Every structure is written in structure tokens, then in C-alpha cells.
Image (cartoon, grey):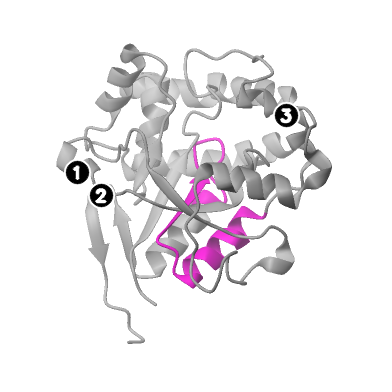
Amino acid sequence: MIGGVGLITRVPHASNVLTNNFTQSFPPSDHRSLRRRDWLIKAKAIVDEYVKPISDQLGITLSQLALKFVLSYPVSTVIVTVTSIKELEEYVEAADGSYLSPRVLGDLERLYDELISIRLSQ
Amino acid sequence: MTPFPPFGRVFTAGVLGVAPSLGVNGFVLGVVVTVGYRPTGSSNVGKPPLGGTTPSTKTLAELVFIKLSLNPHIVGQPRHKWRDLPVVNVLNEGLAAIEEGYESIMFVFNALEQEPGRALIRAGVDRGCWINNQGSTCLKRTDE
């Protein structure tokens, strides 16, 4: 059978680690509380050291970089968690059709392959 | 990969393709989902979803019910017990869903959790036909 395969992505901000609103703990009823605390801490450290500088260099917010990263692939859509109009405007602004260059995307892929995937699996 | 939420094993046939017409590339806010549910476990990879040989259509509530029914040991326990569930092989389940002709699949994908998302995206594109945030694209398969 041949047909379109919709590729729906979710959790683009990795439980808020890829935003400027990160907190390490969540209410028990919040599904983000199911993340391991040590994973969150390690992920936040990686973001601060390696990912945030990229968004700063590009002149966009960390949240926008996270969305542009996902939308730089041939995905159908990305499901975001929005809790305010301000966030919504920030996120929609990121979906402007101008996504990451092959160089930046390559840098983020290498960063994942050589560092992030290893550190976060330990 | 994170083992949660339990819908990680649910492959979604949903409302897509509205984003370009809204002028907001790649965004669908409030996705309507009807879903085909795949049984869990590696032994079920490649088998048809519950409800027959074609993807069944179930509501989210039905899925939760099925999920709980298949895992009776967790019924009535606090929600954090989901942590104890086995990790779903998202890659294999996703590849099987693509191969079976599911209309769409849903998975976690972000800069910190790039796999198996990148592999699933490659598989979807390699299949020759996909819907992306720029609209629908379909390539002619060489074996047809």
C-alpha cells in the first residue's frame, strides 16, 4: 500500500527543558513529573552549555529554536503545549517558514549523536 | 526515550494538512485524533492492530480503557505507577505502523530526544510518500 504517512511530533520542548521557563519539579498530576529528576538536571545543563548559545547566536528564543529544529524536518506537524497567549505568539512566530540551515541542523544532530544521547542515557 | 505517556504506542490517524491553509506552517493546535491501537510488546510488532486487519478507530477514552484493561495490575494504583510499565519500542512499532499503511504516526521528537524520531522520519520519507509542513508530497515508487 502506498499513501501519505503523517509524521506527528510531540514534546518539542522536552518537558520545558528547551524553554526559559524550566522548573525541576512538577505537581504529581503533571505528566512531566514522570521524567526522571536526574534526566532533567542533566538535560538542563546540556541545554545551558550547548544549545542556548545557538539560539542566542541566531537571535531567537530557546523555545523557538526547539520548534524550528523539529520543523526543519519533513514532519507533518508539531504538537506544542501552550499555557498563555504570549507563549502561543512566540511559538507561532517560530513557524515562519524560515527554519534551520543545514549547518545548524547538522551541528545539533552531531551534538546529539556525540554528546547528548550518551550523557542522557547514563 | 521516555516510556510515558502510554499513548506512545498509539499511532494516530488524525486531522492533518490544515496548517498551510492557515498560513501557520506546521502547526495544528488542537489535533483531532482517531486512532488505531497496536497491542504492546515486541511479539506483536507486525501484527494487525486490535479490532481487525485494518486500523481500528477508537476514541482516546477507549484507548485509556483498553490500556488499563490490558494492564489490570495497575488499575486503581496511583498514576505515577505508569513509570513501572515496560518501555515501548517506539522505533519498531512505528516502522511496523508505517509498513502496515497507517495514515500517520505520532512520536516524541526534539533536539534532546532525536531518536528514534530521526529514524522514523527517514522511514516515512523513504517510503516515498508523506505529508509535511509544506503540504503533501508523493514520489513514484520504483517498485510499482
Kindly report which numbered mark, 3 or 1, lies closer to the viewer in this rendering.
3
Chain where mark 1 sits: B
- Amino acid type, mark 2: Gly
Residue plotted at (50% across, 12% down) = A21
Disc 3 designates what residue?
Answer: B79
Disc 2 designates what residue?
Answer: B17
The x and y percentages for residue B69 are 72, 49
Say left or right for A55 vs B113: left
Of labels 3 and 1, earlier in sequence is: 1
**Is circle 2 on the same chain as circle 3?**
yes
The x and y percentages for residue B55 are 49, 65
- Amino acid type, mark 3: Arg
Chain where mark 3 sits: B
Residue plotted at (49% across, 26% down) = A51
Please say if A80 is above or below A77: above
Q: Residues within 10 Å of mark 2 (few under 14, many from 20)?
A: many
Q: Which of B116/B106 is in front?
A: B106
Q: Are marks 1 and 2 in contact (CB under 8 Å)?
A: yes
Please say if B66 is above or below B126: above
* Magenta residue span: B89-117
Residue plotted at (49% across, 71% down) = B100
Q: Residues within 10 Å of mark 1 (few under 14, many from 20)?
A: some
Chain where mark 2 sits: B
Report helix, strand or loop for mark 2: loop
Q: Are marks 2 and 3 in contact (CB under 8 Å)?
A: no
> Which quarter of the rendered picture does the N terminus of chain B lie within?
top right
> Which quarter of the rendered picture does the C terminus of chain B lie within?
bottom left
Q: Residues within 10 Å of mark 3 (few under 14, many from 20)?
A: some
Disc 1 designates what residue?
Answer: B20
Say left or right for A112 vs B2: left
